[in-house]
Amino acid sequence: MQSDFCKLLKIQKPILSAPMGGAAGPDLVAAVCGAGGYGVIPLWGQSADQVIAGIDQVRALTDRSFAVNLNLSFPYEDQLQACIDKKVHAVSLFWGMKPSAIATAKQGGLVVLVTVGSAEEARIAEDAGADVIIAQGWEAGGHVWGQVSTMALIPAIVDAVRIPVVAAGGIADGRGMAAAMMLGASGVWIGTRFLASKEATIHDDYRERILNATETQTVWSHDLYDVDWPDAPHRTLSNSTSRIWREAGSPAPSNRPGEDEVIGYRPGGDAVLRYQSYTPRPGTRGDVEAMSLWAGQGVSLVRSIMSAADIVDEIYREAKQVMQSRQSIL
């Protein structure tokens, strides 16, 4: 599967780890890079100094290329400049379409990955100078930009642009990777599967629920976990919070049952409110089950805890086997 795309990202395996805020720290990113994939670390919402420190932490663990993920719906200019100053390999831009941000990153010498939810957005990003399109299907966990399924989205975007397209959403094993590659994708972007990695920085209760969930146990919501991040649709595991909200008729913010209720505490002691956008980390106390447990529809394929490197190796090996075996069928 070596390709121009792999050469662009300086990798051996076209597998990228999604920038799962709170779950994807330096250890996970470095492990994916060390296995021949491409790690993406989320550093948005932090000061420029914190971005620099985050980049340095990853570089202390790996000498391979990786990307910094920035959220365009929050202030990002200082963070982007920090990435340019530190000469990081790439930035991953998401939650918005800002050609000016793409242009600034390109002028700063960075490779630019842009997450989109439609072919039209992909064309805009390509025209602005993007190097790679991350096509995020509706099946994806966490915050979901578009509403088109991965199966329909990938070929539509592949046909619309000339630059490499990476498939995201519902992909958790080699079969999913092979299917994405057959649809024309140059690589895959994986999140939920890495939640079960040894390096993921999530609470044990969260990880256990991931391991036991079925494909029907995720829910997409427009404004459920909107505290600290409003107007941002997302997919999570079904839990007590989502159930009481739906039983109440899915009321809008300010009218939801249990609103402003403290359901736990972060490791540093800050309160976690019901309906808060928060990834439960180790050391979180309280009702973890009721918190925002991000997960995609591929969660039913996640059944064991493995190292991130082993996950990369397994998915890559399975994808090759599937693609080779299917050639004989036709």
Image (spheres, helix red, strand yellow):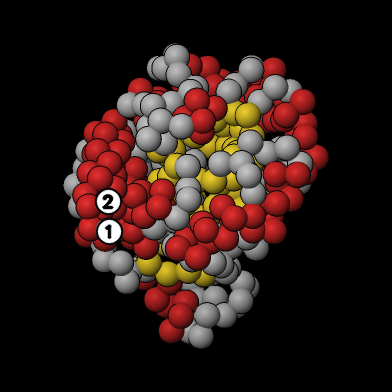
Q: On screen, 45 above or below 323?
A: above
Residue 236 in view (yes/no): yes
- Residue 305 x, y percent position in the rendering: 21, 42
Q: Quadrant of the C terminus?
A: bottom left
Quick one: SS at disc 2? helix
- Residue 185 x, y percent position in the rendering: 47, 48
Q: Quadrant of the rendered structure where residue 92 is?
A: top right
* 314 lies left or right of 255: left
The answer to whether the residues at label 2 and label 1 have Cβ atoms under 8 Å apart is yes
Q: On screen, 215 above or below 2?
A: below
Which residue lies at the image location 68% right of the left edge and 39% below the top edge? 130
* 227 lies left or right of 282: right
In the rendered structure, which amino acid carries the disc numbered 2? Gln
Which residue lies at the image location 57% right of the left edge and 60% below the top edge? 156
In-front residue for pair 81/53: 81
Q: Quadrant of the rendered structure where residue 317 is?
A: top left
- Residue 103 x, y percent position in the rendering: 77, 34
Give the labeled residue for mark 2: 327
In the rendered structure, which amino acid carries the disc numbered 1? Leu
Which residue lies at the image location 39% right of the left edge and 57% below the top edge? 170
Farthest-out residue, right: 100
Which residue lies at the image location 25% right of the left edge and 45% below the top edge? 324
- Residue 221 x, y percent position in the rendering: 52, 69
Q: Quadrant of the N terminus?
A: top left
Q: Dot 1, how many residues are within 10 Å of its Cα: few (below 14), some (14-19), or many (20+)?
A: few
Distance from disc 2 to disc 1, alpha carbons, whole Å, reads 6 Å
Give the labeled residue for mark 1: 330
Residue 293 in view (yes/no): no
